[in-house]
Image (cartoon, helix red, strand yellow):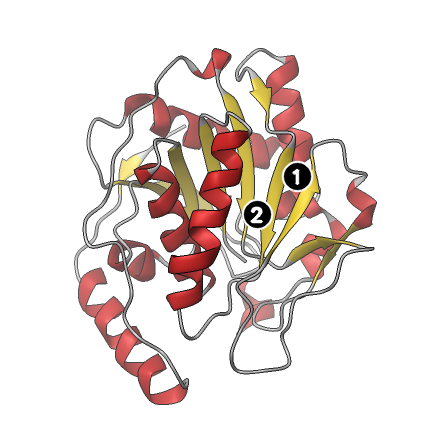
Amino acid sequence: MQMVPLDTTGLGEKYEDWIRFIAKTHHGSNPRTNEVAPFSPLAKPLADSRVALLTTAGAHLDDQPPFQVATVAGDHTYRLIPDDVDLSRLRFTHTHYDTSSAEQDPNVVLPLDRLHELIERGRIGSSSPVHIGMMGFNPDPTGVADELAPAVAGMLLEAEVDVAILVPG
Amino acid sequence: MCHRSVGLVQGELERAGISTASVTVRPDVTVGMNVPRAAYLRFPHGNPLGEPHRPDQQHLILEALLQLLETATEAPTLIELPFRWKRWERWL
């Protein structure tokens, strides 16, 4: 497939506009970001790598507590989704995007079936025993950066994950 | 804000030594978040991997992400994929 470099002309300015907009409209907002883009190249071939999926589309299991979407504070907790989950048990609690496609086919935001097919084909080595459901609407990003992200990183390192694929809502 | 949350988690994972790639439908936020690798799709929120029940399309997108992981030599490496959304009228 054709993969062209993204034309980033004007995107930095558009981001700054968005940051100013949410600062006016959402309490607690601040421009937290990665100061520089970090880079960890693949340590081994994908065929030998363990892969985890993460989504901020509000994915959780039917018997896990839904994400808190009723307040302006957001919710920077996470839900563990087992690798062998029955996808019909996934729920999507998020009020800032249309969840209907994810409800019809969870692979639209958490492509677990495709991941397993890639393992069968030998394209990747294995999958993480757990994948991560998060809810991305967090006007104040401090909790995401200082609590959620380190917790998820620690868990995936413990699971000996080499590669992570992240999908927004 | 989903994209900012992705960016913050992605940055932490990459700093921890995990190689990461993400999908984005908001390239402005993805650029602002300084993520290491991402693929932009001109899809609406809620459809980052396209239409429901399109495993062929989902595989093409995942394969692009895998190739991005294999070929990127610096961060950020941001690409655009040539899909177009056929149902924009639903979202207008």
Position of B89 relative to A85 (above/below):
below
Q: Position of residue A124 (x, y in %)?
A: 53, 17
Dividing the picture into quadrants, the one containing residue A63 is bottom right
Q: Which residue is drawn at 34% across and 22% down?
A: A42
Q: Is residue A8 visible?
A: yes
The residue beneath circle 1 is: B54
Q: Which chain hosts label 1?
A: B
Packing grade of label 2 (10 A; few <14, some 14-19, many >=20) is many
Q: What residue type is labelled 2?
A: Gly
User: Residue A56, image x and y in percent?
Assistant: 54, 56
Residue drawn at the location 57% of the way across and 62% of the way down: A135
Q: Residue A108 carries which label?
A: none
Q: Where is residue B62 in the image (x, y as percent from the top left)?
A: 50, 32
Task: Please give the residue where the numbered disc 2 appears in the rendered image.
Answer: B50
Q: Are marks 1 and 2 on the same chain?
A: yes
Three-letter code, disc 1: Arg
Specify whether residue B61 is in view: no
Query: Residue B27: image x %, image y %?
Result: 33, 56
Q: Which of A34 and B74 is in front in this view?
A: A34
Mark 1–mark 2 CB contact (< 8 Å): yes
Q: Nearer the viewer, residue A127 or B77?
A: A127
Q: In this view, does B88 lie above or below A16?
A: above
Q: Nearer the viewer, residue A158 or A17?
A: A158
Q: In this view, does B1 lie to the left or right of A66?
A: left
Q: Is residue A55 left or right of residue A62?
A: left
Chain at tag 2? B
- Structural distance between the alpha carbons of marks 1 and 2: 8 Å
Question: Which image quarter holds the N terminus of chain B?
Answer: bottom left
Binning the other alpha carbons within 10 Å of mark 1 as few (below 14), some (14 to 19) or many (20 upward) gives few
SS for dot 2: loop
